[in-house]
Every structure is written in structure tokens, then in C-alpha cells.
Amino acid sequence: MEGAVPTMAKPAGTLCRRCVINSSIPGVHLDAEGICNHCHIHDRLNAMFPLGEEGTRRLQEIVDRIRRDGRGKPFDCVVGLSGGRDTCYCLYKCKQLGLRPLAVHFDNGWDSDIAKNNIRKICTGLDVELHTIIADWEESRELTNCTIRASLPYIDLTDDIGIVHALYSSADKEGVRWIIHSHSFRCEGINPLLWNYMDGRFVRHLIKRFCRIRLKHFKNVDLRNFLYWVFVKRIKVFTMTNYYQDAGEEIDELLKREFGWENTGGWHFDNEIFGLQCYYSRHKFGIDWRVVELAALVREKQMTRDAALAELAEVPAIERKEIVDYALKKQGISPAEWAEIMAAPPKFFTDYPSYYPVLRVIRLPIKVLCRLNILPPHAYEKYFEM
Ligand SMILES: [Zn+2]
């Protein structure tokens, strides 16, 4: 499928014989044995990032480099923190490895109380300095509504831009060369490109076309910001989770025991708008965000395929009516507007201007940047092989 631009969902699909990914998902294709390309990408990443002794040795090598680059500076690296288990455990690992991280949290106005408490507890317990960047609520709300009015499947898109901006600008301000990323292909899988693609040109266009207020605080991440951070400031992204096993109950237990960390109550409960996200994308687009994560856990043998299929047959807990209604009210969306939104035809980033056609032309240099840890290593797979 390399070289093809992803298109909208195909009508009927076949289930991968190994995981729970269905071939009706955009960008998914099955080989002659009935195994999906997400499984092959997972295996390739597992071969690229071995665990065990080899993984520990390579992790130590990169950590030594990060510490050398941090000499004479107040911090060695910036770590994004959401209050969920993955980012909290990543911060813990950084300290265990002798790094001096600066924790950065982007508050979009939807943090649950448990997530807020977890952030405080883990930073106090590890003696890590925390910088919280608070988004302007009116703007944050309007930007989310822009993505909904644009009929796009991922409504948290501009918050993700906010996170990227917060991490790079904090690193830039403190003179730090490394951002530690905790996305885990083993635990979370990789979302299809069509579900949550974003870039600066795309966001700029959405704002121009759908935003009803004048923005004073929002910081987009445009290509020139990115080139400045990557090539002038030489800030690198290191996906540390690639080098350790982050799946399993024992991680929750460790965080609870050592820091009084609390489970946020289930899948994505740290970010309360995700209930609305789930309902909206499942009902309007047939997109169930759980499938990618559950498929990854099946491949990692953290879950049986039958258990994952049984879970997918249930409505996600976060989609409870009161959670969705609360989110709609907080977003200022009336029932009449909501009905209109749900009835409007689904759109994807490919329906709007973006940098994607340019990225496709320069995909080989991007592959090199991914392999050099300058961009997240799985970014190439996501952008050009799904
Ligand atoms: Zn599969």
C-alpha cells in the first residue's frame, strides 16, 4: 500500500487472523495469509526496538547521550505528562535512569481531578519540576468546535497541536535538546492516518474557515516553527517507551504503591472530552478508537483475541450518556446543532488543504529523520505505510 493516499472506509471488511483489526478500516490491508499491515508494522518495530538485555544496553547509550547534552543546563530533557499511567511511568523511568527531566503538562480544560492529582503526586514524589501550560478556555473550546463543524473524526486535534507546541517551546526556552515521548506501539498501537492526521497548514485552514472568534493565544505549529526547532535548535524526540515493556498490571501497582497514583477509572478517563470523541466518531464515522489499542495488546499477548473482540462488542464506558451530555453542554453545543452535526456527511483531512502532498514527496528524508530519532520512529510507518 506504500505510495497510496489513504481513502475513506471500504464498506465491508475481513478481520485480521492474528489481531482484531478489520480490513474496512482505512489504510488496512490483509496479506495472503489474512494478516494485516498493522501486525507487520508492529513486528517490524519490535525487531527495530528489542527489549531485554539489548534494549537495556541501547537505552543506556541514548540516556548517556542525553545526559552529556544536558551538561551545564538545568534539565536534561522535557517529558510530557498527562496524569495517565504511560506518561507517569515514563517520568519515573527517566528518574530511575538518572536523568533530570522537566515535566510539561498542557491543560486544555478537560483534565479529570484524578489526572490533576496524579500529576501533582508524581512530580512531588519524584522531585521533578512541573511547568503547566494552560490553554485559554474560550479559544480551546472554539477550536474543538471547529473540528466538529469541519466534520472531521478527531475533535481533540488542536489540543494535540497545543501539546506539541508546549513540549518544543519548553525545550527551546530551557535550552534542552531532548523531548522524551511516551507513545507506545506495544500498548497503544498506531492510529490510521486518516483518523487523526494534523499539520500546521491544515489547522490554519480549519481556523480560517470554521472559527467564529478572534484567536489571541492559540499557537499553531507551522512548518517554519518545526524546521526551527529541529534544525536550528536541534531538538530531538526520543520515544523511550520503545525500549521497555510498558504493558502489564505491575506498572499500575508500582505507581500506586510508590506515589499514591490512582487509575483514572478506565480507558482515556484522564481527558474528559474523550467521551464525546468516542460517541461522535463511533456513531458518525464507525471509528472505534479502542480497536487499535486492543489489537496491539493482543499482539503483545497481554490480552486474548476473544477477550478483545468481546470488549469491542460492548459500548465503551466513557461513552455514558451523562459524560457525553456534560461535554456537549461544556462545549456550548445545543441539541439542535448536535443533530445537524451528526447528520452532516463525514469528512477527512484529505478533503481540506494540508502539507500531506508535500510530505509524500519528501518521505525518504523523513524516513532518515525517524531512524535517527529526530522525529518519532513510528511516524514514517504511520504517514506512509498505513
Ligand atoms: Zn493484525
Image: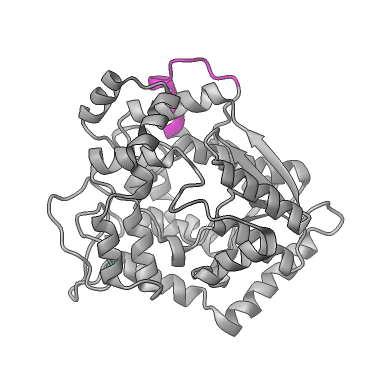
Quarter of the rendered structure image containing ligand 1: bottom left
| Closer to the camera in the image, 311 or 381 | 311
List x then y, in percent, for residue 83: 59, 50
| Closer to the camera in the image, 190 or 289 | 289
Residue 35 shown in magenta: no
Q: Residue at x 30, y 56 (%)?
A: 3
Which span is picked out in magenta? 202-216
Q: Quadrant of residue 111?
A: top right
Q: Residue at x 29, y 20 (%)?
A: 337
Q: Quadrant of residue 44?
A: bottom left
List x then y, in percent, for residue 316: 33, 50
List x then y, in percent, for residue 97: 72, 69
Q: Quadrant of the N terminus?
A: bottom left
Classified by dominant secondary structure, the portion drawn in magenta counts as helix
Locate residue 28 relative to residue 157 in the image: left or right.
left
Q: Residue at x 75, y 52 (%)?
A: 124
List x then y, in percent, for residue 360: 38, 49
Is 100 situated above or below 119?
Answer: below
Residue farthest toward the bottom in the current orientation of the protein: 53
| Closer to the camera in the image, 21 or 250 | 250
